[in-house]
């Protein structure tokens, strides 16, 4: 039995999310799968632990380190501590997959990078480590060095239906702390006294907008019964009464939703309401009716821009009239809408920014049941925007071989090349964003997930 520590690296940026209530689903999925196969797992979550607390607890023979762009400035410290402890150091996560070779070239203490799904990769690595075999030969989704060369093993998708319900009692996870954190930092949302947590029952989206950093480009889901069982587990074992399912696109499959509704009604429903991510293009009248029937209270949608030309340029093909109609249909069905907008996507102008802000105002005035959020674009590695940026030789030289970036400068470099917002583009967007957030009664923080 191998002992494995999975680390959610703390953010080193003030612009990262400040409400630390997200139970790290990616690590839970992997950790639960490893535990099911006989390995011991300990999660160190940088949302609830300081960097020094994490560094002082690293002790496992195998350490898997989650890498997101906001944690880039901290990751070398975690890698170094794991190497000093004699651990086999693995790196995975959203930013690791597109930057695998950069990580291996830039830090010799990293033994391998795990790309895409990590469950089978970590299981096979742990099994081989236990048996004193080469841990990388048979592990899928692994990128590693061998005789001075970078080797990429075959990519395999794990069937989500084969995975157990993520165990919220894994060592290192105190769900009560996350529930408390939600109440502490989200009082403006109106959930006072409620027991709120998150879940993730699907992966991927069949569409690829220019700014989307999802690793999964195809849609996969757990079975409707499995999703219901996970929600029920949260209600029964932890007294949860509100669940945010932040799957990439919860309502993309109308047939899945029909089956989920049948399970929901057959088993007497849930004593919990749901908030889900959905694409407005998927929300037909029948889908909306099914969502309402299974306790969906709030739908989080990405509207992104109020300029149809900008939407088309960024592969978000939707007309303004259609956006308004779908949002109105949701609110008329009794659901609240949380709409997100991205300022600074490809081709943005000051006029298109005004169109976006005006659309958000129009929706708020017409529905009374919408909350608008605004973010400034960040060109995440792996997105089409990132690929477009690196076509510039200067940007390729500056960012193409690294994995630690100055986030503010990267944004400025992107905006100056791919938007028409003037010399002070970043400052302009920051000012517009702050003003509209205050107008919407929201704290000025980064809402990017």
Image (spheres, helix red, strand yellow):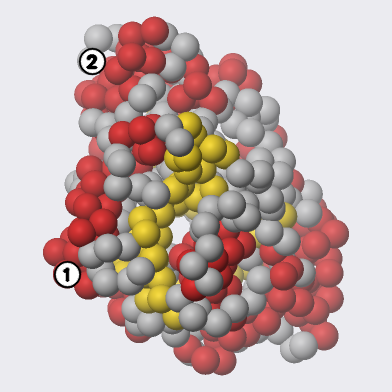
Q: Nearer the viewer, residue 140 or 386?
A: 140
Question: In this view of the protein, can residue 400 be seen by the observer?
Answer: yes
Image marks 1 and 2: residues in contact by CB distance under 8 Å: no
- Residue 4: percent from the left, percent from the top? 41, 71
Picture quarter containing residue 207?
top right
Q: Is residue 149 left or right of residue 442?
A: right
Please provide percent x and percent y for residue 367. 55, 50
From the viewer's perspective, is the residue at label 1 or at label 2 nearer? 1
Which residue is drawn at the image coordinates 67% and 30% (left, top)? 318
Q: Position of residue 275 (x, y in %)?
A: 55, 64
Q: Nearer the viewer, residue 73 or 11?
A: 73
Residue ID at (48%, 89%): 239
Mark 1 neighbour class, 10 Å CA radius: few under 14, some 14 to 19, many 20 or more = few
Which residue occupies the foreground of this view, 240 or 59? 59
Identify the residue position indicated by label 2 in the image.
424
Local packing at callout 2 (Cα closer than 10 Å; few below 14, some 14-19, many 20+) is few
Above or below: residue 40 compared with residue 354 = below
Q: Position of residue 31 (x, y in %)?
A: 49, 72
Which residue occupies the extreme left position in the image? 52
Q: Which residue position holds label 1? A: 56
Identify the mark nearer the N-term, 1 or 2: 1
CA gap, disc 1 and disc 2: 43 Å
Q: Residue at x 78, y 49 (%)?
A: 284
């Amino acid at each position: 039995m191998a002992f494995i520590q999975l680390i959610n690296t703390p953010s080193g940026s003030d612009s990262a999310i400040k409400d630390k209530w997200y139970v790290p689903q990616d690590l839970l999925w992997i950790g639960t799968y490893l535990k099911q196969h006989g390995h011991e797992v300990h999660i160190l979550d940088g949302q609830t632990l300081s960097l020094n607390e994490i560094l002082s607890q690293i002790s496992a023979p195998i350490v898997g380190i989650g890498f997101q762009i906001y944690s880039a400035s901290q990751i070398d410290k975690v890698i170094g501590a794991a190497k000093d402890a004699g651990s086999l150091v693995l790196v995975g996560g959203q930013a690791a997959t597109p930057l695998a070779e950069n990580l291996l070239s830039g830090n010799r203490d990293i033994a391998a990078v795990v790309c895409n799904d990590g469950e089978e990769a970590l299981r096979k690595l742990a099994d081989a480590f236990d048996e004193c075999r080469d841990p990388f030969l048979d592990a899928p989704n692994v990128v590693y060095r061998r005789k001075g060369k970078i080797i990429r093993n075959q990519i395999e998708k794990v069937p989500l239906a084969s995975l157990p319900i993520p165990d919220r009692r894994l060592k290192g996870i105190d769900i009560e702390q996350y529930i408390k954190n939600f109440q502490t930092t989200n009082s403006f949302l109106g959930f006072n006294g409620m027991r709120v947590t998150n879940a993730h029952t699907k992966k991927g989206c069949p569409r690829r907008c220019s700014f989307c950093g999802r690793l999964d480009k195809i849609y996969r889901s757990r079975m409707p019964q499995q999703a219901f069982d996970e929600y029920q587990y949260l209600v029964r074992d932890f007294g949860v009464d509100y669940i945010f399912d932040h799957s990439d696109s919860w309502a993309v499959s109308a047939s899945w939703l029909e089956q989920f509704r049948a399970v929901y009604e057959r088993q007497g429903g849930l004593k919990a309401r749901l908030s889900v991510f959905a694409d407005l293009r998927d929300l037909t009248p029948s889908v909306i009716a099914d969502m309402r029937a299974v306790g969906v209270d709030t739908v989080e949608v990405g509207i992104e821009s109020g300029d149809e030309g900008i939407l088309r340029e960024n592969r978000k093909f939707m007309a303004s009239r259609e956006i308004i109609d779908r949002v109105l249909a949701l609110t008329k069905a009794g659901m609240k809408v949380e709409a997100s907008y991205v300022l600074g996507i490809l081709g943005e102008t000051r006029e298109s920014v005004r169109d976006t802000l005006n659309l958000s105002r129009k929706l708020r005035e017409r529905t009374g049941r919408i909350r608008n959020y605004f973010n400034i674009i960040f060109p995440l590695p792996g997105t089409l925007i990132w690929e477009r940026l690196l076509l510039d030789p200067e940007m390729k030289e500056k960012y193409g071989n690294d994995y630690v970036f100055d986030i503010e400068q990267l944004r400025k470099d992107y905006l100056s090349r791919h938007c028409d917002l003037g010399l002070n583009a970043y400052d302009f967007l920051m000012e517009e964003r702050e003003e509209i957030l205050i107008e919407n009664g929201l704290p000025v923080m980064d809402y990017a997930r």
